[in-house]
Amino acid sequence: MINKLQQIQQKCKCSINLSINDYRNYYQSIRKGIDEINRMLEDWGDDLLSEEMINKMIEHEMIVELCFYPDTPVGSYNIFHYDIEQALEEALRILNNN
């Protein structure tokens, strides 16, 4: 996992933010945290979390958010997942295809 994070760091010119279960800092239920993510995604005009992803997040009681800025402090990617390793792999796929 550390190796993947280092690869992401090497490919990004700006910041990388990894958040795990941030919803707990606000005494929210996982469902409330997921609802807030979907509202944010909707505001951005992005696809909402799939039912499958939502169910896995609830099952594992895990919300991983990985935000990274590959080129400038303006353009970022946000990945939401229930598995840290898979979120890192998805980020690397994005970075390797750019």
Image (tube, grey):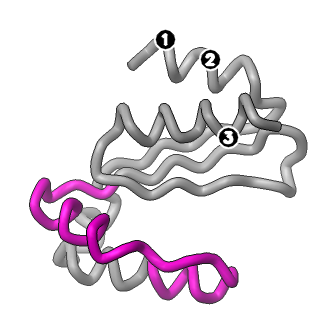
Which residue is painted at 49% across and 79% down in the image?
48
Q: Position of residue 3 (x, y in %)?
A: 49, 11
Residue 3: give its label.
1
Earlier-in-chain disc, 2 versus 3: 2
Q: Quadrant of the C terminus?
A: top right
Quarter location, residue 94: top right
Location of residue 88 with respect to 23 vertically, above or below: above
Residue neighbourhood size for the residue with mark 1, other residues' Cα within 10 Å, grouped as few (<14), some (14–19), many (≥20): few
Q: Are dots 3 and 1 in contact, CB under 8 Å?
A: no
Q: Amino acid at mark 2?
A: Gln
Q: Quadrant of the N terminus?
A: top left
Query: Which element type, helix, strand or loop, lies under badge 2?
Result: helix
Residue neighbourhood size for the residue with mark 2, other residues' Cα within 10 Å, grouped as few (<14), some (14–19), many (≥20): some
Q: Amino acid at mark 3?
A: Ile
Q: Main secondary structure of the magenta part?
A: helix
Residue 94: give its label.
3
Q: Which residues are magenta?
A: 38-63
Location of residue 30 with respect to 10 vertically, above or below: below
Q: Are dots 1 and 2 in contact, CB under 8 Å?
A: yes
